[in-house]
Image (cartoon, rainbow, N blue to C red):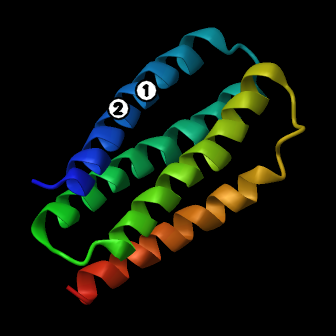
Amino acid sequence: MGLIARSFLFLGALNGALVVALGAYGAHALQARESAALFQTAVQYHMFHALGLIAVGVVAAQQTGRGLLIGAGGLMFLGILFFCGTIYLSAITGYRGLSALTPIGGMAFILAWLLLATAVVWR
């Protein structure tokens, strides 16, 4: 298995562990209903995209021509940081100063899935 596949499988697994820990934190530490609901949204998107990183790693292990896959995995990770990260920050601290990054993270998710679909079709 190549470095690209191993890297995205590792990132996916690491983010899977992180999202479970964050989910437990959110379930037990956040008392405000609005914050808990916001946090839950981040947890859901984070888990979906941790699995997406694993999917990128699996596809990368099976094919050559990985440029699209590197883009897909990179954008998925960037989406986790910008979309989920800003929501986590807002839910925990109430600070909304980085909320302009949230839609950029959402667009990164969309582009990542489109690149993954393209990589699979052009295999």
Instruction: Please rate how many residues cluster around mark 1, counting C-alpha atoms within 10 Å: few if below 14, some from 14 to 19, many from 20.
Output: some
At 67% from the left and 31% from the top, the residue drawn is 88
Q: Amino acid at mark 1?
A: Leu
Instruction: Please rate how many residues cluster around mark 2, counting C-alpha atoms within 10 Å: few if below 14, some from 14 to 19, many from 20.
Output: few
Q: Amino acid at mark 2?
A: Leu
Q: Position of residue 71 (x, y in %)?
A: 44, 68
Q: Quadrant of residue 67?
A: bottom left
Q: Quadrant of the C terminus?
A: bottom left
**Vertical arrangement, residue 117 with respect to residue 9, above or below:** below
Which element carries disc 2, helix, strand or loop?
A: helix
Per the image, the residue denoted by label 1 is 18
Per the image, the residue denoted by label 2 is 14
At 35% from the left and 41% from the top, the residue drawn is 11
**Vertical arrangement, residue 20 with respect to residue 57, above or below:** above
Q: Position of residue 73 (x, y in %)?
A: 41, 59
**Vertical arrangement, residue 52 with respect to residue 88, above or below:** below
* Side of 65 relative to 32 (left or right): left
Q: Quadrant of residue 55?
A: bottom left
At 22% from the left and 55% from the top, the residue drawn is 5
Inter-mark Cα distance, 2 to 1: 6 Å
Q: Quadrant of residue 92?
A: top right
Mark 2 and mark 1 residues within 8 Å of each other at the beta carbon: yes
Which element carries disc 1, helix, strand or loop?
A: helix
Furthest toward the front, the residue is 3
> Closer to the camera, 19 or 57?
57
